[in-house]
Image (cartoon, rainbow, N blue to C red):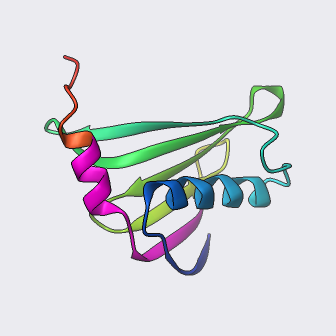
Amino acid sequence: MNQCSSVRLDTLAELTDFVNTKLCEQNLLKLGAFPLTERVLRRRGKPCAMSFCLHGPRMVKFMAIWEANSNRILFYNPSGECMDVAVLISSPVDEFIERFSAQDVEA
């Protein structure tokens, strides 16, 4: 497993762009050619992480998880193995909590 250098990402848009770019680079995919979906992960009803899924060719999925409390992004290959970790020196935790705490949680 590789560990990339520390990264400063101040907004959710920067986080999403970084993850999309990194997944494309790691898997030799053209940036913007495949859709990226996001999902908020919750613990006890509170947002704690974001899951990103790049839907690649032939239905292959490339995943990344941003853990808000530890400020790191884990990148996974299609087999579910962690292939890389990015440590964030700055992250959009406040924006994330503010945006997704107010949303109703479906039971």
Is 105 rendered above or below residue 44? above
Say which of 10 and 56 sits in front. Answer: 10
The image position of residue 36, as x and y in percent, is 63, 38
Residue drawn at the location 36% of the way across and 68% of the way down: 71
Residue 85 part of the magenta-drawn span: yes
The image position of residue 104, as x and y in percent, is 19, 25
Residue 80's quadrant in the figure?
top right
Is 79 rendered above or below residue 15? above
Say which of 9 and 88 sits in front. Answer: 9
Q: Quadrant where the C terminus lies?
A: top left
Residue 89 part of the magenta-drawn span: yes
User: Which residue lies most toward the left here?
Assistant: 44
Q: Is residue 10 left or right of residue 68?
A: right
Q: Is residue 84 left or right of residue 105?
A: right
The image position of residue 56, as x and y in percent, is 76, 36
Residue drawn at the location 31% of the way across and 68% of the way down: 70
Q: Is residue 88 left or right of residue 4?
A: left
The image position of residue 4, as x and y in percent, is 60, 77
Is residue 89 in sight in this rendering? yes
- Which contiguous range is marked in magenta? 82-99
Say which of 3 and 16 sits in front. Answer: 16
Is residue 82 in sight in this rendering? no
Residue drawn at the location 55% of the way across and 53% of the way down: 16
